[in-house]
Image (cartoon, rainbow, N blue to C red):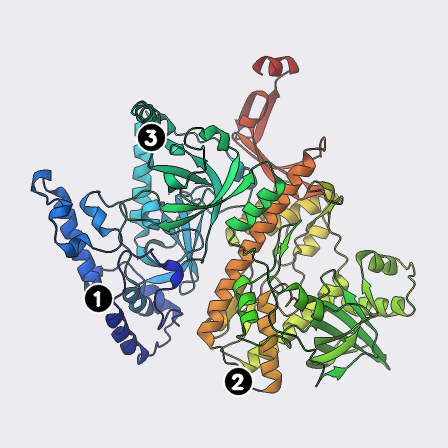
Amino acid sequence: MNLLEGQTAPESTRGLFDFPEPTKRREKQQQRRRSVELTPRPASTYRASLQPVNEETIMMSRADVLAETEAKLTRRLSEPVTKRATPTSRPASARLSTGSMSSLFDRKPLFTSHLPFSSVLPHIKSHVLVSGLLRVNRRNRSNAYVFSEELNSDIYICGSRDRNRALEGDYVAVKLVEVERVLMEKHEKEEAKLARNHGQPLIRKPDEEDEKEIIFGGEDDVEQIPPKYCGTVVAILDRAQNQVFSGTLGLTRPSHKKSDGPQQERRNSMNSPPRIIWFKPTDKRVPLIAIPVEQAPPGFVENPNLFEHRLFLSSIRRWPITSLHPFGVLERELGSVKDVEVQLDAIFADNNASTDVLSLDASLTDAFKDRLDLRHVPCFTIGKDKQNALSIEQMEEMVKVGFHVADVTSLVELDSQLEKEARSRGIQMDGVLKQIPIWPDELRERVELTENKDRGAFSVIWTFTEDGKIADTWFGRTLIHSSTMLTDKNVRDILDLDSIDEEGVETDILTLYSVACMLHSNRRHGLKRPQLVFHFEQDSTKPSQVEVSDHWQVLFEEFQILANKYVAQKIASHLPDQALLVSQPPHHTRKLKELVNYLKEFGYTLDPHAFEQSIDRMTPPEVQQVVRALLLKTFSTEKYFCTGAYDISRFYHHGLDVPLYTHFASPLTRYTDALVHYQLQSALSDTTFHLDTEAVQRIAQQCNAKAKAARQILESAQHLFLSCYLDSVQQYDAVVVGIQEGAFDVIVLPLLLERRIHTIHLPLKSDTFDPNENKLHLIWQTSQQQQQQQ
């Protein structure tokens, strides 16, 4: 299936392509392509066809023109300067050449021109090229990867030249190349660097990204584990709209300050102002951006040091093939880098989170018609976001349990402006102190399952037998009335047999808990990732307390998982080619094997088929916490997908050990759940769902990207506020989980903090690593020696 079939270059890539699309030619090619159906091919055929090929035999006429043009330009650049025509002597058609090609007459190309959009699509369809999202290694920007759905594998992109001006998160087209050749060229470059440095390896001072990656984390080292596929980027197919980056300004290029120094002195002596200034992004995966000096803030050129700790936002406008760095504009100033709220705004900006205030243009009418009235059934709201509720109805020898979800889709039509805005946002972004929602506050307040109010819900109701088996399942829209909101403390008190005030609640909660425990015992348990909870004083941005969330939620999560499973089965059976599901690939095999061997060295056995049981047998409890933290690093990430776009063998959710799974329970904070509500209603009413496979898969891919951004925002915000908290705390105990030359890895269990500590940052007299005994010997400086160094 080709998700780009029939499309033209999206607006977000304007200025990225080196050649424009001729409208008439593009329309003719689209007409021809519409009559051609893509026939499915087995995976073996994909792999056979996705081998390095001779482009001369496959490229269309426009690509041939491109190659011929570049060949002419190369020959022209090799001619003596006296034989070259001056820019003013060239024909008008040459002087008006689009994109960056005109600059090739003056400067040598550093990158390959992108293929035009209309040329790329046929080659993706015929499996000559593959496509996917690009991700760049945070620690080493030279390493990048594109995950290909066709190959179900990563493609390694080596160096900035092969990445060809693509950025993190871009949807790109890739040509496969020989793995051996790429690794050989990479090795030759490393050898050349050694030779330039007189045989001594270049030692890079560790930075913050190096500290975040501990044992069993990060990407595979391509030097030790060769990639399965290698490739080069030949086109940027899509890029996030309105993308901005946070960073600082500099008058000289940061990596060349020494070489720029004499030039700067000469410039100052000649009273010649600079033409550009440099924007250094906070995210090291983003290249330096050249900014016109006219956009510099007042006083910057005369006194750049005064702006050293000021954060700005910048965007990229163009990146010619002759330029090592992109050109951009300065959007606005955020403020001081020492301001916590400014840092938080920068985190949101770096992850392309829209901070525009949502408004509700249309009036809302409560849709209480055609609902099953359950207001007489005991019901309890669960969770601070008030998206879910549980109801219970006791019967002879059976019990009915209802899982109810806030019904936002009954008030928002599919493809309305409000729904499209939620779709573009994808997921609520949580920055600890600030959240960016996907729905307007007015709408949320109308549909939240607030206690003591009648509310519409989308529900799944099961009838359980005494032994916990499901005798019947019902789906549909309901009308409920929650009597109370259960908090963590409420549930803990009840489960500890301490009564609460509401009459009858205690008995109902204990019955629900009993059913949940039976469900829990009958399924394979995935590991839960614990979360930090920050407590703030009023009007303060500095946390007063930090704790790990208490997972009492077996009561809630078992019914949530059960609802997700049953809804997945329902929509997949009714919409076999359009259902939005969630899969989770198996564990990272190599990392899991290394972890098993690592634990054996300490006398612990980890059964890959029974994690929880293995961990529960380990003592003391701190060991269990450490093993869970390390085991989570071997997990693969959940991914949304459309059933018509994947082979059925890839549907499985390995974390929960279920063949079909989706997300149904959080439509107020995740757009995917809202889309599943639309699909469930289509299944229940037996109507046609108007979004086709390609549209649903594009939504799935976008939501995967948004979910990744949300994780990065939360992790960065937690790190920010944890740093503020630790600034006023003296010390915490940490567990050393790994050692190597020049560094050791620790986990601070009470704070879920994982860090690599580099010895170069410690006041040490000496540090010696013994690889045979796997020991790191540290000798600390005395207080007097530290004072002398200061």
- Which residue of the protein is positioned furthest toward the left in this rendering? 83
Q: Based on the displayed image, in which of its 4 quarters is residue 3 positioned?
A: bottom left
Q: Badge 1 is on which residue?
A: 60
* Residue appearing at x 31%, y 46% in the figure: 161
Is 586 rendered above or below residue 280?
Answer: below
Tag 1 near tag 3, CB within 8 Å: no
Residue at 75% across, 79% down:
479
- The Cα atoms of the two marked residues, 2 and 3, are separated by 64 Å
Residue 194, which numbered label? 3
Label annotation for residue 688: 2
> For this view, does 392 lie left or right of residue 352?
right
Q: Is residue 491 left or right of residue 251?
A: right
Residue 478: assigned label: none
| Residue type, mark 3 in image | Leu
SS for tag 2? loop
- Side of 310 where 515 appears, left or right: right
Q: Which percent across, then down, holds residue 223?
A: 40, 42
Where residue 122 sits, quadrant-wise, is: bottom left
Q: Residues within 10 Å of mark 3 (few under 14, many from 20)?
A: some
